[in-house]
Amino acid sequence: MVRVAGLLFVLSHVLPHNSAITKSPTTPVGKVSRAGAAAPRRSYQSDVRLGQIVRLLMDHATVVVSGTKISQQIGTTRSQVWRLIQQLRRLGVDIAGHPATGYQLRALPDLLLPDILAPLVRGTIFSEHIHHYYKIGSTNIAALEAATAGAPEGSVFLTEEQTAGRGRSSRSWHSSRSAGIYCSVVLRPLLPPADVLILALAVALAVKAAVEEIGANLKVDLRWPNDLLLEGKKFCGILTEMSAEATRVRHLVVGIGVNVNHSDFPASIEKEATSLRLATGTEWSRVELTAALLKSLDREYRNLLRKPDAPGSILRRFSQQSSYVRGMQVHVDENGGFDGVTESLDPRGFLQVRTAHGMRTVLSGSVRPKPQ
Amino acid sequence: MNQKELKELIEFLKEQDIAEFELERGDVKVRIKRATPNTSLPHDARFVAVPAAPPPPSLPGHAPVTPAAHSTPAPAKEAPGEPPEEALHMVRSPIVGTFYEAPSPGAPPFVKIGDSVEVGQVLCIVEAMKLMNEIESDVAGEITKKLVTNGQPIEYGQELFVIRPRK
């Protein structure tokens, strides 16, 4: 991974040319209602019409829809419709036609638009507040800002392209346009911070389940704490950022980056990075995978909140599904660095490594296989 | 649910700006409705408490703030020089993890001794399992001591900084 110093808290403002699609505000359901905590105000233009056009064309996929009809349906002019169609084409949406003939989709677009995604994740905590960007610094920063401003639990931030995707210790995350899933969610668990740690492992299990649900024969490995690997190369990373006091969590932002349809990587990371497409030889639907991922995450999260035995289940499943938990010769990049053989997870989820000087607990360092 | 938990709940609702809250667990039922400056509720008194729940302490609007950890001692005889020990505030870690004083390796630390900090200002990061926890200051004042070093593993509840609260 490329190291980019100083990125972590600098890029708090997204670029001015961003446009955002935000689902129109919905009436809060359930018994918690917020006073004055409206959706975060954004300084850049919000254009829900792009999603509306795609939805409209999808609903009439077999016929040509006239520019006039579109302009009436979304309440704008025909020339605006033409401009928006051009914008969609630049994003890779395959639309046939021009103002004189009307428009038709040639293929279903694989854009992570709220209008497309929301119906697929109905019934989860993620269906009501999906925010989509064409380009953004980092979805984690957008989610953190929104969470600080009061964004509700279950808010989702997706982007087609990240200009400053982040990894651990300010490593950058290679985020090509529309090739990956760059997704951050806001959670507000009513749990003490110490009990939330295990969610770091649960998110990895959730993403693994989603990937294997679609790619049935894939053998995904988990590298402690939450990297997803195929053939020893990483295709998904997870970075969680928490704002907490001693006894309670204010909010938690879980950022998930998945390399889906990347066909290559910069030379500096090609030895350790892969994508689902490179590993399987076929294009994946990002929409389908994102929906599966959010549903799977919803399941893990609800279990953690409601089932007293959830932590035990997470530890057990992680240990079964990861080759890193037991018997691997590793180097750990923590506290000066040390070598050893992995032994197990402790009850909190930390990795135990047997070294020449006794058992050591890995809290946060990166763990890599060490050739014998 | 005891008095302390209820207080914490109310503080949480206030902080998150949650107007209404209802909880039913077994035979305990709690229902809280807060009046907020920007919503006028004509009937907010009706929902203050329901039977089966212990009466929450004076709810509407401005619930009493729980005594802060740095409770100012009763003005006793002024000790010359050193401020009284109780006046200093201790920042502790809410999780086990690795302590980072800066946002990234090589970057300047969030705070150093002698710095003046505000409530909510980030003091450091504690990382566990790629979960980065930003520790914020819960008081305004001056950093007088840093009790841990960069990259050090720390325990739950371990003391990280000493802050002399601003008067």
Image (cartoon, coloured by chain):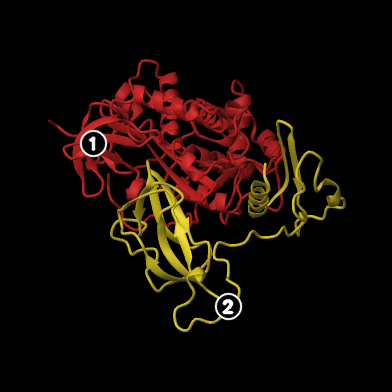
Chain colours: A red, B yellow
Q: Residues within 10 Å of mark 2 (few under 14, many from 20)?
A: few
Residue A330 seen in the current view: no
Q: Is residue A262 left or right of residue A148?
A: left
Give above or below for A357 relative to A63.
Answer: below
Residue A232 in percent (x, y) is at: 25, 28
Give above or below for A349 relative to A164.
Answer: above
Give above or below for A10 relative to B3.
Answer: below
Chain to which mark 2 belongs? B
> What residue did someone put label 1 on?
A368
Residue B16 in percent (x, y) is at: 64, 51
Quadrant in the picture for the C terminus of chain A: top left
| Same chain check for tags 1 and 2 | no
Foreground: disc 1 or disc 2: 2
Q: Residue at x 62, y 28 (%)?
A: A122
The alpha-carbon separation of the residues under discs 1 and 2 comes to 58 Å
> What residue did someone put label 2 on?
B76
